[in-house]
Image: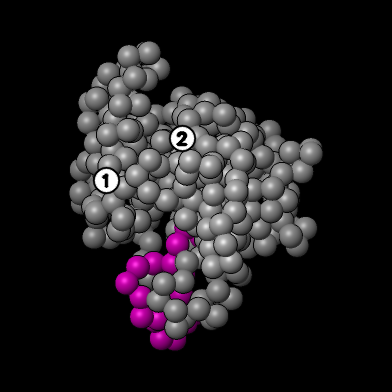
Amino acid sequence: MAAGIGSRYGGLKQADGMGPGGETILEYSVHDAIEAGFGKVVFVIRPEIEADFREIVGRKIEPRIRTQYTFQEIGTGLEWLGQMPHRKKPWGTGHAIFSAKDCIEEPFVAINADDFYGADAFKAIGKFLREDCSPAQYGMVAYQIGNTLSENGSVSRGVCAVSPDGFLTDVVERHNIRRDADGIHFSDETGRYFLPDNTPVSMNFWGFHPTIFGEIETQFREFVLANKDNPSAEFYIPKVVNTLVKAGKVKVKVLNSASQWYGVTYPEDKNTVQAALKKMVAEEMYEPVLW
């Protein structure tokens, strides 16, 4: 998913060079996916960034893996709706995944373009897709919240509850999460709440069967009808998954990662990510020039 405007970041962060050779975070994800055995990548972008995206990212990746592009626009998937709602941006991560429905017929992973997940996560989810994914069972990689924070401001995360046998029982989008002197907390209109460092959170690293598209379409229609007059309403993929779990339609196997997550939410985060990638290159986890 690479169509995000990056309003807090201040630019097209999905195409910003982070690696020692000027590689984007997304290039590392595609590299790790190829190494884990994936055979196709679908980029969900906006039409207005297509030329720049293809030049900065696509031209390096297209020779190495089957590559497709699809667009997420405000009206994508809304052909049934008479009058388009007045919005400045598309509908969020659930809508982004739905935008790729015509490109995907096989089990797949959905990820954010601006998150660095690590090679082990792609290996784990790849094994899950080959062996365990089905219409009744999806998967996700969960990170410990203490490994996913920014030093430069608050973040939003899908806070997860997991059963003793390793399946997702609940995921709730929490906002205004930060580390303070007394630990990690999130806050909302009802108060301020503590979160242990090892709390599992979703970083939008999902393993889906293609049947998810039909479920998204049903929920998206309901969401649009309920929120067409709210220009800031977001159709989040964790909410879609949570609805299916609560209804007993699917089980979601949680693959836990103790790795440090890296991402760019704020401009100041760029230095942290660059330093981390430089260290990984020094430790020979990646080549100095990725491709």
User: Residue 19 placed where, x, y %?
Assistant: 28, 29
Looking at this view, name the residue that lies furthest to the front: 181
Q: Are marks 2 and 1 in contact (CB under 8 Å)?
A: no
Q: Which mark is residue 226?
A: none
Quarter residue 207 falls in? top right
Q: Which mark is residue 261?
A: 2
| Label 1: element kind | loop
Please say if 237 is above or below 131.
below
| Residue 44 seen anywhere in this rendered image of the structure | yes
Residue drawn at 57 percent across, 29 percent down: 258
Residue drawn at 29 percent across, 30 percent down: 274
- Scheme of colours in the image: one colour
Q: Main secondary structure of the magenta part?
A: loop
- Residue bearing mark 1: 267
Q: Sort mark 2 into few (<14), some (14-19) or many (20+) by Cα contacts within 10 Å.
A: some
Q: Which residues are magenta?
A: 76-94
Q: Nearer the viewer, residue 153 or 2?
A: 153
Please say if 81 is above or below 202.
below
Q: Nearer the viewer, residue 95 or 268?
A: 268
Looking at this view, name the residue that lies furthest to the bottom: 82
Apparent side of residue 1 relative to residue 184 in the rendered image (left or right): left
Quarter residue 280 falls in? top left
Q: Nearer the viewer, residue 63 or 195?
A: 195
